[in-house]
């Protein structure tokens, strides 16, 4: 185990030195290329910032208004069908939009039910098996200027459903 830790601590500097060395051997202006990449990165950040702020504000408003809890209670029968505890449904909904906000909900669930409870296990596995679909669609598709997302949302929602079902099954096996 110590060998793996030692190797992993050297990997990032090794990759950086490899890239710089490769550029120097090929007589590239490595620093100038790096600066150009940083400039492009800042352009992307400036372009997606309004979308990020909008998503964060929307999640904050929905969570603070109590609409999230109401929606969770409304979807509780569907959750019961999939054997998802009603307490986890708001987490699943928020996870679709924001990982940070979902982390806050997970910590709340841990405080109330414990990390080793069925709810705690399902919440942990949901965070690992699902993705913030709307965040990714709005930020990454906007950044690369994809106009037609076609089946992205449907595929993401199906993958999320599969992740939630897998979370319930895996948590059930672990208890």
Image (tube, rainbow, N blue to C red):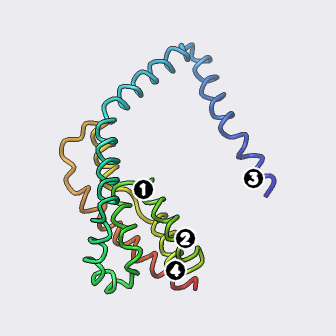
Could you give the CA–CA distance between mark 1 and mark 4, rounded to whole angstroms? 22 Å
Mark 1 secondary-structure assignment: helix
Out of 91 and 25, give the one closest to the viewer.
91
Instruction: Check the picture and name the quadrant holding the N terminus.
Output: bottom right
Eye-nearest disc, 1 or 3: 1
Q: Is residue 73 left or right of residue 101?
A: left
Mark closer to the chain start, 1 or 4: 1
The furthest residue to the right: 2
Q: Residue at x 31, y 86 (%)?
A: 81
Tell me, for residue 110, which label it has, or none: 2
Q: Residue at x 45, y 80 (%)?
A: 168
Give the residue pinned by disc 3: 4
Mark 4 secondary-structure assignment: helix
Instruction: Check the picture and name the quadrant holding the C terminus.
Output: bottom right
Q: Position of residue 35 (x, y in %)?
A: 49, 18
Mark 3 secondary-structure assignment: helix
- Image: 118 above or below 97: below
- Image: 19 above or below 9: above
Eye-nearest disc, 3 or 2: 2
The local crowd at label 2, few if under 14, some if 14 to 19, many if 20 or more residues have their Cα within 10 Å, is some
Could you give the CA–CA distance between mark 3 and mark 2, rounded to whole angstroms? 31 Å
Give the residue pinned by disc 4: 171
Q: Position of residue 34 (x, y in %)?
A: 51, 21
Q: Is residue 52 left or right of residue 168?
A: left
Give the residue pinned by disc 1: 101
Could you give the CA–CA distance between mark 1 and mark 3, rounded to whole angstroms? 33 Å
Could you give the CA–CA distance between mark 2 and mark 4, rounded to whole angstroms? 15 Å
């Amino acid at each position: 185990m110590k060998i793996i830790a030692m190797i992993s601590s050297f990997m990032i500097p090794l990759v950086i030195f490899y890239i710089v060395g490769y550029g120097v051997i090929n007589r590239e202006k490595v620093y100038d290329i790096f600066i150009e990449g940083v400039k492009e990165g800042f352009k992307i950040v400036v372009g997606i910032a309004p979308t990020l702020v909008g998503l964060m504000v929307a999640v904050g408003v929905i969570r603070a208004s109590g609409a999230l809890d109401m929606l969770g209670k409304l979807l509780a029968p569907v959750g019961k069908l999939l054997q998802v505890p009603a307490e986890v449904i708001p987490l699943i909904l928020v996870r679709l939009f924001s990982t940070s906000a979902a982390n806050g909900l997970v910590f709340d669930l841990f405080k109330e039910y414990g990390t080793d409870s069925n709810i705690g296990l399902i919440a942990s596995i949901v965070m690992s098996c699902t993705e913030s679909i709307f965040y990714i669609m709005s930020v990454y598709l906007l950044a690369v200027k994809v106009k037609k997302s076609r089946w992205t949302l449907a595929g993401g929602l199906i993958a999320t459903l599969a992740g939630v079902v897998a979370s319930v099954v895996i948590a059930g096996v672990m208890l």
